[in-house]
Protein backbone atom coordinates (compact mmCIF):
# COMPACT_ATOMS: atom_id res chain seq x y z
CA UNK A 1 0.00 0.00 0.00
CA UNK A 2 2.81 2.40 0.94
CA UNK A 3 4.72 1.95 -2.34
CA UNK A 4 1.53 2.66 -4.30
CA UNK A 5 0.87 5.81 -2.26
CA UNK A 6 4.44 7.03 -2.79
CA UNK A 7 4.17 6.32 -6.52
CA UNK A 8 0.89 8.25 -6.68
CA UNK A 9 2.37 11.26 -4.83
CA UNK A 10 5.48 11.23 -7.04
CA UNK A 11 3.34 11.05 -10.20
CA UNK A 12 1.11 13.93 -9.07
CA UNK A 13 4.12 16.10 -8.21
CA UNK A 14 5.70 15.29 -11.57
CA UNK A 15 2.52 16.16 -13.48
CA UNK A 16 1.99 19.42 -11.58
CA UNK A 17 5.56 20.68 -12.13
CA UNK A 18 5.69 23.37 -14.81
CA UNK A 19 8.35 22.71 -17.39
CA UNK A 20 10.19 25.64 -18.95
CA UNK A 21 12.18 23.65 -21.47
CA UNK A 22 12.28 25.26 -24.92
CA UNK A 23 10.36 28.33 -23.73
CA UNK A 24 12.41 30.65 -25.95
CA UNK A 25 12.56 29.99 -29.68
CA UNK A 26 14.80 32.11 -31.84
CA UNK A 27 13.74 32.89 -35.38
CA UNK A 28 15.98 31.18 -37.92
CA UNK A 29 15.95 30.44 -41.62
CA UNK A 30 17.49 27.46 -43.39
CA UNK A 31 18.13 28.20 -47.05
CA UNK A 32 20.61 27.36 -49.78
CA UNK A 33 21.92 30.93 -49.79
CA UNK A 34 21.04 34.36 -48.47
CA UNK A 35 22.37 37.28 -46.52
CA UNK A 36 21.63 40.67 -45.06
CA UNK A 37 22.46 44.28 -45.81
CA UNK A 38 22.21 47.15 -43.34
CA UNK A 39 22.20 50.80 -44.36
CA UNK A 40 21.59 53.25 -41.54
CA UNK A 41 18.50 52.09 -39.66
CA UNK A 42 17.32 49.81 -42.49
CA UNK A 43 18.06 46.07 -42.38
CA UNK A 44 17.27 43.95 -45.43
CA UNK A 45 17.45 40.16 -45.10
CA UNK A 46 17.02 37.75 -47.99
CA UNK A 47 17.13 34.02 -48.69
CA UNK A 48 16.88 31.82 -51.75
CA UNK A 49 14.83 28.67 -51.38
CA UNK A 50 11.50 27.12 -52.12
CA UNK A 51 8.15 28.81 -52.38
CA UNK A 52 6.33 29.39 -49.08
CA UNK A 53 3.93 26.52 -48.47
CA UNK A 54 2.22 27.04 -45.13
CA UNK A 55 2.26 29.33 -42.11
CA UNK A 56 1.09 28.05 -38.73
CA UNK A 57 0.52 30.47 -35.86
CA UNK A 58 -0.74 30.16 -32.31
CA UNK A 59 -0.54 32.79 -29.57
CA UNK A 60 3.07 33.99 -29.71
CA UNK A 61 4.60 31.26 -31.93
CA UNK A 62 4.80 31.25 -35.74
CA UNK A 63 6.15 28.49 -38.02
CA UNK A 64 6.74 29.26 -41.69
CA UNK A 65 8.02 27.03 -44.47
CA UNK A 66 9.80 28.26 -47.57
CA UNK A 67 11.04 31.79 -48.19
CA UNK A 68 11.78 34.09 -45.27
CA UNK A 69 8.52 35.70 -44.23
CA UNK A 70 7.75 38.76 -42.11
CA UNK A 71 7.18 38.33 -38.38
CA UNK A 72 3.99 40.36 -38.41
CA UNK A 73 1.05 40.17 -40.75
CA UNK A 74 0.63 42.84 -43.39
CA UNK A 75 -2.32 45.00 -42.35
CA UNK A 76 -5.30 44.85 -44.63
CA UNK A 77 -7.45 47.81 -45.56
CA UNK A 78 -10.40 45.61 -46.51
CA UNK A 79 -13.50 46.38 -44.49
CA UNK A 80 -16.23 43.97 -43.55
CA UNK A 81 -19.58 44.45 -45.23
CA UNK A 82 -21.52 41.84 -43.25
CA UNK A 83 -20.95 39.92 -40.05
CA UNK A 84 -22.57 37.03 -38.22
CA UNK A 85 -24.11 35.34 -41.28
CA UNK A 86 -26.16 32.33 -40.21
CA UNK A 87 -28.44 29.95 -42.09
CA UNK A 88 -30.98 28.12 -39.94
CA UNK A 89 -32.54 25.68 -39.46
CA UNK A 90 -29.80 23.62 -40.98
CA UNK A 91 -30.55 20.84 -41.94
CA UNK A 92 -33.88 22.14 -43.22
CA UNK A 93 -36.96 20.62 -44.85
CA UNK A 94 -39.46 23.24 -46.10
CA UNK A 95 -37.79 26.61 -45.48
CA UNK A 96 -34.64 28.19 -44.11
CA UNK A 97 -33.77 31.66 -42.87
CA UNK A 98 -30.66 33.63 -43.84
CA UNK A 99 -29.76 36.16 -41.16
CA UNK A 100 -26.83 38.61 -41.05
CA UNK A 101 -25.80 42.07 -39.89
CA UNK A 102 -25.25 44.48 -42.78
CA UNK A 103 -22.66 47.06 -41.71
CA UNK A 104 -23.36 49.60 -44.49
CA UNK A 105 -26.08 50.23 -47.07
CA UNK A 106 -25.57 47.80 -49.96
CA UNK A 107 -27.13 45.84 -52.79
CA UNK A 108 -27.44 42.21 -51.67
CA UNK A 109 -27.96 39.17 -53.88
CA UNK A 110 -28.83 35.85 -52.20
CA UNK A 111 -28.49 32.70 -54.32
CA UNK A 112 -29.09 29.05 -53.53
CA UNK A 113 -26.79 26.78 -55.53
CA UNK A 114 -26.94 22.98 -55.71
CA UNK A 115 -23.87 20.71 -55.67
CA UNK A 116 -23.80 20.64 -59.48
CA UNK A 117 -23.37 24.43 -59.51
CA UNK A 118 -26.89 25.22 -60.75
CA UNK A 119 -28.60 28.26 -59.27
CA UNK A 120 -31.98 27.06 -57.98
CA UNK A 121 -33.01 30.29 -56.20
CA UNK A 122 -32.06 33.96 -56.49
CA UNK A 123 -33.20 37.10 -54.68
CA UNK A 124 -31.86 40.67 -54.85
CA UNK A 125 -32.52 43.60 -52.56
CA UNK A 126 -31.14 47.05 -51.79
CA UNK A 127 -30.82 47.11 -48.03
CA UNK A 128 -29.91 49.67 -45.42
CA UNK A 129 -27.43 48.88 -42.66
CA UNK A 130 -28.79 46.72 -39.86
CA UNK A 131 -30.03 43.20 -39.15
CA UNK A 132 -31.34 41.48 -42.29
CA UNK A 133 -33.52 38.35 -42.27
CA UNK A 134 -34.63 36.56 -45.43
CA UNK A 135 -36.67 33.34 -45.65
CA UNK A 136 -36.03 30.93 -48.53
CA UNK A 137 -38.76 28.43 -49.43
CA UNK A 138 -37.29 25.00 -50.12
CA UNK A 139 -40.48 23.44 -51.53
CA UNK A 140 -39.82 21.49 -54.71
CA UNK A 141 -36.08 21.12 -54.09
CA UNK A 142 -34.55 17.65 -53.95
CA UNK A 143 -32.86 16.57 -50.71
CA UNK A 144 -29.12 17.15 -50.77
CA UNK A 145 -26.32 19.61 -50.10
CA UNK A 146 -26.74 23.20 -51.28
CA UNK A 147 -24.84 26.45 -50.75
CA UNK A 148 -26.36 29.79 -49.80
CA UNK A 149 -24.16 32.29 -51.66
CA UNK A 150 -24.46 36.01 -50.97
CA UNK A 151 -22.92 38.78 -53.02
CA UNK A 152 -22.56 42.08 -51.15
CA UNK A 153 -20.54 44.97 -52.64
CA UNK A 154 -18.41 42.65 -54.80
CA UNK A 155 -17.66 40.33 -51.88
CA UNK A 156 -18.87 36.74 -51.69
CA UNK A 157 -20.14 35.00 -48.54
CA UNK A 158 -21.20 31.35 -48.48
CA UNK A 159 -22.76 28.84 -46.08
CA UNK A 160 -23.53 25.17 -46.63
CA UNK A 161 -27.18 24.10 -46.34
CA UNK A 162 -28.44 20.52 -46.08
CA UNK A 163 -32.00 19.82 -47.23
CA UNK A 164 -33.74 16.66 -45.98
Image (cartoon, rainbow, N blue to C red):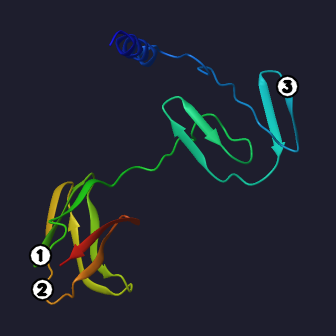
Q: Quadrant of residue 151?
A: bottom left
Secondary structure found at label 1 = strand
Which residue appears at 38% of the width and 11% of the height?
9
Q: Nearer the viewer, mark 2 or mark 3?
A: 2
Within 10 Å of disc 2 (Cα), the crowding (few <14, some 14-19, many 20+) is: few
Nearer to the camera, 103 or 22: 22
In this rendering, position of residue 123 left or right of residue 34: left
Residue 24: image location, x then y, percent: 62, 20
Within 10 Å of disc 1 (Cα), the crowding (few <14, some 14-19, many 20+) is: some
Q: Nearer the viewer, mark 3 or mark 1?
A: 1
Q: CA distance from mark 2 to mark 1?
A: 7 Å
Residue 139's tag is 2
Residue 128: image location, x then y, percent: 20, 59
Relative height, residue 78 to residue 156 (above, below)? above
Nearer to the camera, 40 or 149: 149
Secondary structure found at label 2 = loop
For mark 3, what is the residue? Answer: 39
Residue 16: image location, x then y, percent: 41, 15
Which residue appears at 77% of the width and 36% of the height?
29
Residue 144's tag is none
In this rendering, position of residue 81 left or right of residue 76: left
For mark 1, what is the residue? Answer: 95
**Marks 1 and 2: in contact by CB < 8 Å?**
yes
Give the mark, 2 or 1, whose residue is nearer the N terminus: 1
In this rendering, position of residue 104 left or right of residue 30: left
Q: CA distance from mark 3 to mark 1?
A: 65 Å
Residue 61: image location, x then y, percent: 56, 31
Q: Quadrant of residue 12?
A: top left
Q: If the image is split into quadrants, where does the N terminus sit?
A: top left
Amino acid sequence: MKPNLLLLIFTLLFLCYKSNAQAVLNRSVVGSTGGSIQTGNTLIQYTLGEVAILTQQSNDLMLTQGFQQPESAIPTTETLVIKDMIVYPNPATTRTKVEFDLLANAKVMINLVDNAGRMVYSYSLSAIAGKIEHIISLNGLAPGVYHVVMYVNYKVYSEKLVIH
